[in-house]
Every structure is written in C-alpha cells, then in structure tokens.
Amino acid sequence: MSDHEVRLTVNGVPHTVRVPARRLLSDCLRHDLRLTGTHVGCEHGVCGACTVLVDGKPMRSCLLFAVTVDGASITTVEGCRAPDGGLGPVQQAFWDCHGLQCGFCTPGFITTITAFLQENPAPTEEEAREAIGGNLCRCTGYQNIVASVLRAAELMRSAPPPDPVSDPVSDPVDHELSFGVDGVSRDELHDQPSPGAGSRS
Amino acid sequence: MKPPAFTYHRPTTVTEALRTLAEVGPDGKVLAGGQSLVPVLNMRLAAPGHLVDINRLEELSYVRVSDSEVRVGALARHADTERDEAAFAAIPLLRQATAHVAHPAVRNRGTTVGSLAHADPAAELPAVLSLLSGSVVLASSSGRRTVGADDFFVGPLESAVRPDELAVEAVFPRPPARTGTAWLEISRRRGDYALCGVGALVTLDEDRRVVAARACFISVGPTPVLVDLTDAADWAEAGALAAAAVDPEDDIHATAAYRRHLVRVLTARACARAAEAVHE
C-alpha cells in the first residue's frame, strides 16, 4: 500500500504530492496542500461543503480519491476570488445579500454557484434554488443564499470574470473569509500539528 | 470518516482491468464514479483490499444511440446520459429519471452503469432498465455475457456482476412508436433517496386507446418492482392495481402504508403524464 505520486493543478498552480491511495481529495487539499478553504462537513457526500470544481465541474471532494483525479485541474474557493485578490463576484454577492452566517458551508456554495452561473448566466429564482439543492446550510434558511445567486448573476453579467480554472492564482492564501478558523495566518497554520486523519471521525 | 487502506490499481485498457479483477478476486472492487462506493468506504461499511479504478478506460466513456437502443458505456457519467440530446430524443425517460439522481455535483461524477451495478433499491436507473426491458453487458477475462434486467437485480445492493466481471455497458432498448414516458418521485428533500419513485411507460394506438401500460417502482421492494397496468380501466384503477402489487416495508423514513399510498397516487399521475407525452 505504497504512496502514489499525484499531480494536481489547483487554482492554476501545479502541485505534486505523494499520498496514500485512500487520501480523499478534500484531505489532500486541506492537509497536503494547506488549502483549508475547502470545508469538510459530513464526509459522505450529503452536505456539499467540500464541493470543488474538477476540470470546471462541481464535485464532492470527500467522494473522490486524490489519486483518481491525478492530472486534473481543481478550483477551490480560494480560486473563486477576483484577479486582484479581493472578493470574486459570487463572494461579493454573498457579502451584499448576507448569504452567510457561520460560513462553514459557504465554500461549497461559492464553488457550486460559480460553476452554475457559467452554465446559466441568467437563472430564475427556481433555477437558483435547484442549483444549490445539493448544499446544506444550517444557519440561513437559504433565502439569502438564493438572493446571492441572483445577485452574483447580476454582478457577473455586468463584469464577466476570467475563467477561474485557467486563471492562475499565484499566492494560495485563503482569502475566503476574514473570520473563523480559516482566518489564521499561514504561519500559525504551519506551526500547528497536522489536523490528522482522525480529527473529525 | 476516512476510508480504510487499500491497494490501488489503475488499468488503462479493459483487457488490463479484467486481468486485474481476475487476480484480486472477491477482495477487489471496481471504482467508477465512486459516489456510492466512497461513502460506504468512508463509513467503514466495507473494506475491500483492492480498488480497480476504471476512470482511465476512455474507451468506455460513451452514450451511443441507434435505431433500436441507447448503449451507455461504463464510464459515461450521469450528467453525460442526462444531457445527451440524441439519447433524450430516443428515450426521454433516461433524462427524466436521471435528473432525480442526487444532485448535479454527484451526477457529474457518478456513472449510469455504476448505479446499475450497485443495485440500490432506491436508485432510479435500475427501474429504468427494468421498465425498458434492458440489459447489462458483463465482461471478464473469460468472455462476455449479457444479462437482462430481470436477472440482473438480485436483491438490495446485489446485482449479477461476479467479482471477476466488469459491467462494461448498459443497453436501453427504445420503446415502440406512440409511447410516452414519465418519471415521478417523492422525497423529503430534493435529491434525497425517494420514499417512492415511479417510471411509467404508456403506448397508445391511433385512437389513443391504451395498447400497453407498465410502471416500475423504487424504494418499495428489494429490487425494482415492475407492474403491468395494460388492463386497467383508467389511471385511478392503475394506481389501485399497482398499490396492490407492491409490498413495501416500514422504515425510519416512512411507513409501509404511506409508501403504498404514494404508489397509488404517483402511478395515476405518472401514467396520465406518460399518455399525454405520446405525440401524434
């Protein structure tokens, strides 16, 4: 059960990691690549918090082994920001519409909605609701998230963003939220012991 | 919630995959989309010693439509089947049912054939295969065999695929002319497993009289439950016939009586909708 070399392009930056076959993509992103914007909720595909884009398509990173997506381009919430490092249009819409409270589920919503709006730039409210049907939020009651989808569509129509997959983000600092556990600096993060495989089980 | 360790195999041809499956035997498991398998592994409900990843078998990534059938390769994702315009034109039921498989993020990775091989009694695609009298092509290093839906679904989470076999293709025959289909299901939340789901297939003659009517049900039996409703006087009676034909069980999600009620109501609605879908 030796380790496997896995090449991933994450938010435009190429990475090579050596991981056991059983390493979930969610854990590979968080533990091996230190991209902690991707959140891990249920770890069996129900909550949608860990959703990332694999070659542009939203998928549950907790239901993928890193080794099986060897060679893929991954977009995480860190890759959904604006080219200047500020909030991307979907993030800005969540800000504008109070689309988050605790923020735990938000990364999965941001990636899901980013992909959805590329496919359907002018959704109806019903389509917006359907698009986020696979993401659970335990705080907001969804009304403001639906409003955020429609607001993000407005923002993106007024200023179409570059393709998040092909647009390299050179500095993988987590800009997603300015509070919560992901707000710790990278130095603090590296000083911490690895979260370890058993931390949530 | 981390999967147990396993030895990983990544064949690049079907021949190589079949050789590996033969070598690892019952301790091996095929990894296609993994949208059912990985949760099972994460929850430690299974611990296969070997996973044979078929995601590099590009030769199996297809949805092919002919005059008589739609053939779906083992690497076609639910989203591929759902979005294929030619497949939709040939068999609208494929899209109607696949749209109810979990959520888009799961459909982007999970595969149509994998859903059949997994044989979950709450899954949509097994009922579609049964309703259309379709089949699955199984390959092993000693040859190929084709198994009809009747024999393919053996029990809950149990299909006819042997450990050394790979389900390489599903064959969905096109229904006859003047046939309409519909898919309806009820779940607590959108994308959850259905408490009851029904696919209906209705064929009408020139005067719009019913020539054939069938329905197939999920979540009300150990395997998809196929019921012939051709002799029903109207769709309400079809609902009553179907409700009498199924034998659902109580569980934490719904009582048997409620599931039977859903069968009755959904059958009448789905058959009416299927009949409306028959074009002149």
Image (cartoon, helix red, strand yellow):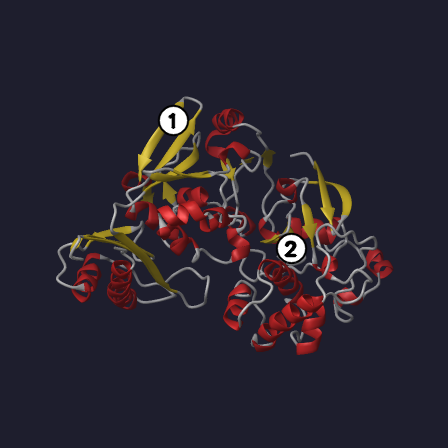
Residue at the image position 43 percent from the left and 26 percent from the top: B140
Percent position (x, y) of residue B233? 12, 62
Instruction: Residue B168 in the image: state x and y as whole percent.
Output: 44, 34
For the residue labelled by badge 2, is the local secondary structure a helix, a strand or a loop? strand
Left or right side of B241 for B18 = right
Most distant residue in the front direction: B280
Name above or below for residue B165 compared with residue B94: above
**Which residue is denoted by mark 2 in the rendering?**
A52
Left or right placement of residue B139 versus residue B30 in this view: left
Q: Closer to the camera, A190 or B194?
A: B194
Q: How crowded is the residue under tag 1: few (<14 C-alpha within 10 Å), some, or many (20+)? A: some
Residue A12 visible, this angle: yes
Crowd around label 2: few <14 · some 14–19 · many ≥20 (10 Å): many
Task: Please give the label number shown on residue B144.
Answer: 1
Place residue B69 in its image quadrant: top left
Amino acid type, residue under disc 2 in the picture: Val
Question: Is the residue under label 1 in contact with that under label 2 (CB below 8 Å)?
Answer: no
- Quadrant where the image shows the N terminus of chain A: top right
- Residue under mark 2: which chain is it in? A
User: Image quarter for residue B204?
Assistant: bottom left
Q: Please name the residue shown 44% across and 56% down the image.
A: B99
Label for residue A60?
none
